[in-house]
Image (cartoon, rainbow, N blue to C red):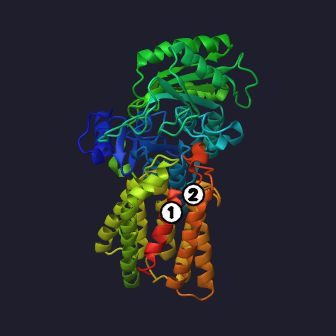
Amino acid sequence: MTRLFNDPVAFVDEATEGFVAAHSHRVRQVPGGVIRSTKSEPNTVAVVIGGGSGHYPAFAGLVGQGLAHGAAMGNLFASPSAQQIYSVARAANNGAGVLLSYGNYAGDVLHFGQARDRLISEGIPCEMVKVIDDVSSASLDEIQKRRGIAGDLTVFKIASAAAEAGYSLEEVVRAAEAANLRTRSFGVAFDGCTLPGADDALFHVPEGKMAVGLGIHGEPGISEQDIPTADELAELLVKRLLEELPEGVSSAKGARASVLLNGLGTVKYEELFVVYRRVHQLLQEAGIEIVEPEVGELVTSLDMAGASLTLFWLDDELEKFWAAPCDTPAYSKGSVVSAEQLGDAELDIPDPDAIPDATDESKETADKVLAALEATYRVIEENEEEFGRIDAVAGDGDHGIGMARGGKAAVEKGREVKERGAGAGTLLRMAGDAWADRAGGTSGAIWGAALHSLAMAIGDEKKPDAARIAQGVSDARDNIMHFGKAQVGDKTLIDVLVPFSEVLSERVEAGDDLKTAWQAGAERAEQAAKDTAGLVPKIGRARPLAEKSKGTPDAGAVSLSMIIRAVVDVL
């Protein structure tokens, strides 16, 4: 278990402070994460990676010359917020655009997508590559739904080497995508990890058993079996990965591949070497030329007991970039020419706490916005346990906790910026950032996106009318569906948000005042939430246990419908 900490709430901040102090010649801290402390070549692409903390050396440990230019760092196992990603990307930008790369998790997809839109709106070209290497998380037919695990390293390394070689943003994306589609990983776990201050692990694997295909956050695997010998584990991992050769690799025999045997936290190096001994034998027997393999901790999960194997199938360009030198706190190869240290005056770091000017009308509206946030938090607080109970049927049971953390943070931030004279739009935007930062997970990303969309519609100038509010809700719906890829019928909060938005817009267009229209939408939302009990989840962490959730409504849908109802009185 995770034993050494002070205040669990401060764990990530204190770990980051210590990490930067230990590696100040390679990295420096900026709001939202870290960037290289050394100068990069002007007018080259910046590669910014990121994700939740708790996976060291991913993600901060991979920042440095020849590898990533910056890393956005979320809370433990939680996506960084759009504000964090944006801030790190601004600081890392070298003038030729930014590539954002991350593992394919719903919260990351939402937040990195929002950050990309904001960067582009400010004239900074930006593209994204989400890593999809885990073969156990979806079939080959649905490869874009696969999650990213230890294969993060191959994609990040290739993208960064291409940027270092002076490739354009378009060409860096091409190289990164080529690496992505030629990377396959498969993992197992023997037991779960323990968050700092927690009494027990996030999950357990039955005694004497091994979970096959389990995700790095404890997402369900595909089966359980008796714990094998080291050789038997090697044979299981190699057999599965050789069953699926990527496009462009017609036969394993004669192919070149790098091999990554990754420990997830408590499987130690000597054990990994015993396993790798047999992996190496099997791959040689298959006729594969092994190029610069890696054995060790590459993407971990705190103290999770487990390991994964990655095959990265090379071509000439990918091999060149894989072998290119780099120097980071956790991963180095070859020899780099030391660059000059970056000066403070050369950084472009936006002030996340700046309050834009607002009209008196907007400041008055901010009172109502804060009251709505307070009503939202009250209903979450009253139903936190129930939200968790519903979520635990087929998910990880953290929906209530996450919503409570996010709602409380949003209210606290809202009160703070209201005292500082914020308008309604700014109050909502900054409350959304606070919600996303503190809540983490998919629900944090979704609620951050929703409040941002409303903030953009409301602004800091005019008192919003019913039509503007309805448009903000519609924008929130569209943004969440665009980035999260959920549709009506997938058993998510979209099953409530879409009908609510439709009824609200219809009633406002028909001439109803906001409260009357919202009330009608709230009634439709409540029914829609109940109706999700008859659905099975098609995306998200509950998807592998889809049938188990039938008969129980979706936790996100239920919480949204209750919040919509709670806001009626404020209106």
Q: Is residue 342 left or right of residue 284?
A: left
Above or below residue 96? Residue 318 is above
The residue beneath circle 1 is 558
Which residue is outermost to the bottom? 511
- Residue 481 x %, y %: 60, 60
Q: Position of residue 120 (x, y in %)?
A: 55, 58
Residue 39 visible here = yes
In the picture, residue 240 is in which quadrant? Answer: top right
Q: Residue at x 49, y 47 (%)?
A: 94
Going from the N terminus, do you reach mark 1 or mark 2 first? 2
Q: Is residue 370 left or right of residue 449?
A: left
Task: Identify the amino acid type marked 1.
Answer: Val
Assess disc 1: are there few (<14), some (14-19) or many (≥20) residues with their C-alpha within 10 Å of its C-alpha: many
Between 388 and 129, which is closer to the camera in this rendering? 388
Q: Nearer the viewer, mark 1 or mark 2?
A: 1
Q: Amino acid at mark 2?
A: Thr
User: On the image, which quarter does residue 182 sit in?
Assistant: top right
State whether residue 67 is above or below residue 458.
Answer: above
Q: Which residue is mark 2?
A: 492
**Which numbered circle lies on residue 63?**
none
Q: Does 14 sit above or below residue 503?
A: above
At horizontal 50% and vertical 63% (from top left) the residue drawn is 558
Residue 536, position as x, y percentages in the image = 62, 52
In the rendered view of the protein, which quadrant contains the C terminus?
A: bottom left
Whether residue 356 is visible to the viewer of this picture, yes or no, is no
Gap between marks 1 and 2 measured at Cα = 9 Å
Q: What secondary structure is found at the residue carrying circle 2?
A: loop
Describe the element under mark 1 as helix, strand or loop.
helix
